[in-house]
Every structure is written in structure tokens, then in C-alpha cells.
Image (spheres, helix red, strand yellow):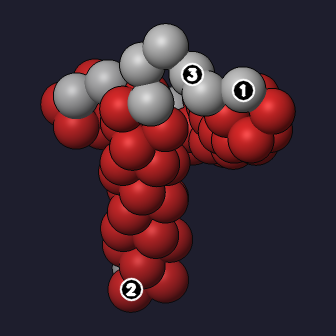
């Protein structure tokens, strides 16, 4: 997911997407610990998407506090 796509999401969509990505990451890590994933880079990509979502949420939080 690109950062421009993340910026276009509403606040509620951001929170929902963050929750979905976090649960997805947990299931990926669990599956990888049992047997290696076919593409282990998915874990890294998922972690980066979570960081982007958290960054955008924090940015909006700071913008709201400054107003």
C-alpha cells in the first residue's frame, strides 16, 4: 500500500486497516514459526505498511492537537 493511498483514507478507515494489518502480521508470524512461508518478505512488507499507517495516524493526531 502506497503512502498516497494511506493519505486518502479517512480516520476510521485508517484505524480499521491498522487493526487488520496487525492481525495479519500476527498470523503471518505464527504461520512462519510453524513452517517457513513461501515468501518471507511478506512479513517485512506488512511491517512497513503498519509503520506507514501508524505514522499517518500520529500525523493527524498532531494536526488535530495544534488546531
Residue pictured at 32% horizontal, 24% vertical: 1
Mark 1 or mark 2, which has the lower sequence index?
Answer: 1
> Going by the image, does 28 lie left or right of 10?
right
Q: CA distance from mark 1 to mark 2?
A: 47 Å
Estimate the x, y position of residue 51 in percent, counting from the top left: 42, 57
Residue pictured at 74% horizontal, 41% vertical: 33
Tell me the tag on residue 20: none
Name the front one of labels 3 and 2. 3
Estimate the x, y position of residue 47 in percent, counting from the top left: 46, 48
Residue pictured at 42% horizontal, 79% vertical: 62
Name the front one of labels 1 and 2. 1
Placement of 55 over or under 36, stated as above or below: below
Q: Is residue 46 visible?
A: no
Identify the residue under disc 2.
Answer: 66
Q: Residues within 10 Å of mark 2 (few under 14, many from 20)?
A: few
Callout 3–callout 1 Cβ contact below 8 Å: yes
Tell me the tag on residue 35: 1
Identify the residue under disc 3.
Answer: 37
Amino acid at each position: 500500500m502506497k503512502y498516497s493511498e494511506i493519505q486518502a483514507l479517512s480516520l476510521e478507515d485508517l484505524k480499521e486497516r491498522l487493526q487488520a494489518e496487525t492481525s495479519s502480521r500476527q498470523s503471518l508470524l505464527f504461520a512462519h514459526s510453524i513452517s517457513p512461508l513461501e515468501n518471507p518478505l511478506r512479513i517485512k512488507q506488512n511491517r512497513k505498511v503498519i509503520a506507514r499507517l501508524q505514522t499517518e495516524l500520529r500525523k493527524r493526531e498532531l494536526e488535530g492537537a495544534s488546531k
